[in-house]
Image (tube, helix red, strand yellow):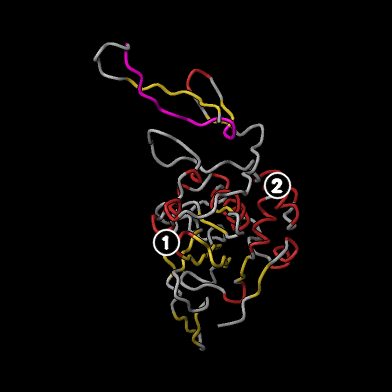
Amino acid sequence: MANIKTLNEIGHLNSSGFGRPWPRHGLYLLHWFSHNYVIFDNNGDLLALYNPKRKEFGFHHFDNRLECDGNCYKLLPNQNYPYYEVGNLNTPGAGDLPPYVSQNYKGHHDDSNMDRIIISLHPGLVLDKVYVTQHEDVRTFDRQNTYRISKGLVRLIRNLELEELLRQVGYPRTIMFVKAVKRQETPARSHTTVYQPAVSQPDWVNNKRPSVVSPRPTPSRESVIDMPHDLFCSHEALSHVSVSIPESRDSHKPRRERRCCVIL
């Protein structure tokens, strides 16, 4: 296995060439991952908001199998914790990703689906390491263009809007103008009774891990939720709640559901 470089700064990400040129989607994927898939707790641990075992967003197990091209190697170090991969826009669950990540993918055999993020996961949804890589061909990954993303770089990306990240890594301004889309929050994937931010009840809550202190990114003015009767609610200020309201206080008629906005 080749020595894997660690990217600690935006400049390192720039010089790595990851996610470029257009129509590659790696930078969009990394921005979504840093803003919407992970958070930091009081101990500085990087935590996943969703369990990758559930295969949401197209996550699936990464085998880290032995590759042979004259010399045999594994892409990542051997370890006792599982690896999970995301970024294949043609895999089940990838439709959960926000549109700005997949906007350039047309289903053709081009470079628009070659980038991946790979994570190693400890118990309690603690991320040990984060890697970015790219396909060398249909089956194998390019070990010369595989990098570890430090927690410090994840923090830096969390503080940047998508357009600013693209600008700092040298995306052409014409591509940014035409293709960059305002960052959108991850869409809900199923109709449930109550919609709450995923951080409110993560899988590690029963293990009594420290409370999360990392701030959520402030949405743009255009970031709104569609609601009935032309009512729009800020995503950060409001939460969708479906409540059952009886027809009358004393009646035993069937209960009906109404949707409302609750100020958080």
Residue appearing at x 59%, y 31% in the figure: 237
Identity of the residue drawn at 53% across and 52% down: 37
Q: Quadrant of residue 60?
A: bottom left
Residue named by callout 2: 163
> Which residue occupies the foreground of this view, 133 or 21?
133
Quarter the C terminus occupies? top right
* Residue 25 placement (x, y as % from top left): 59, 56
Q: Position of residue 9 (x, y in %)?
A: 73, 63
Residue 33 x, y percent position in the rendering: 57, 54
Q: Quadrant of residue 223?
A: top right
- Pick the quarter of the image with the N terminus: bottom right
Residue 122 on image: x %, y % = 47, 66
Mark closer to the chain start, 2 or 1:
1
Q: Is residue 113 left or right of residue 169?
A: left
* Disc assigned to residue 88: none
Q: Is residue 146 above or below residue 231?
A: below
In the rendering, which numbered label is found on residue 60? Answer: 1
Q: Tell which of 260 and 100 is nearer to you.
A: 260
**First to last magenta residue range:** 235-248
In the displayed structure image, the side of residue 70 where residue 237 appears, left or right: right
